[in-house]
Image (cartoon, rainbow, N blue to C red):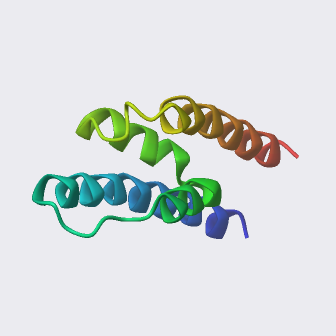
Amino acid sequence: MFKVIIIFVIVMNIAGYYLMKADKNKAKKGHYRVSENTLWLVALLFGATGMTLGMKVFRHKTKHLQFKIGLPVLALIETGFIFYMLNL
């Protein structure tokens, strides 16, 4: 079960990182964008660390306060929760 959880967290963070990249590319081209609800859903499903990294690397959503503050805070909470669960 431990391996499954770790793999899930890794996959969600990779997905979050590339979701930020994809949304940034769509924004540049003026195409239909990824909804903020989808971005937050991935972040809440343990993808916040990858999304925070993607936000910084691609300079995407950095002017939106909810993302600028919310994603790093959520990433810290998720990381703390994972470490807590690993130490049980």
**Is 69 in front, or is 74?**
69
Residue 20 x/y as whole percent: 34, 52
Establish if 62 lies above or below 32: above
Residue 42 is left or right of residue 23, and the answer is right
Residue 73 is left or right of residue 35, and the answer is right
Residue 69 sits in quarter: top right
At 70% across and 63% down in the image, what residue appears? 2
Residue 32 is left or right of residue 7, and the answer is left
Residue 25 is left or right of residue 23, and the answer is left
Establish if 10 lies above or below 80: below
Going by the picture, which residue comes out furthest to the left? 29
Going by the picture, which residue comes out furthest to the right? 88
Establish if 35 lies above or below 80: below
The quadrant of the rendering that contains the N terminus is: bottom right
At 55% across and 39% down in the image, what residue appears? 71
At 25% across and 60% down in the image, what residue appears? 22
- The image shows a total of numbered marks equal to 0
Residue 14 x/y as whole percent: 40, 57
**Is 39 in front, or is 5?**
39
Residue 41 x/y as whole percent: 59, 62
Residue 52 sits in quarter: top left
At 24% across and 51% down in the image, what residue appears? 24
Residue 35 x/y as whole percent: 44, 64
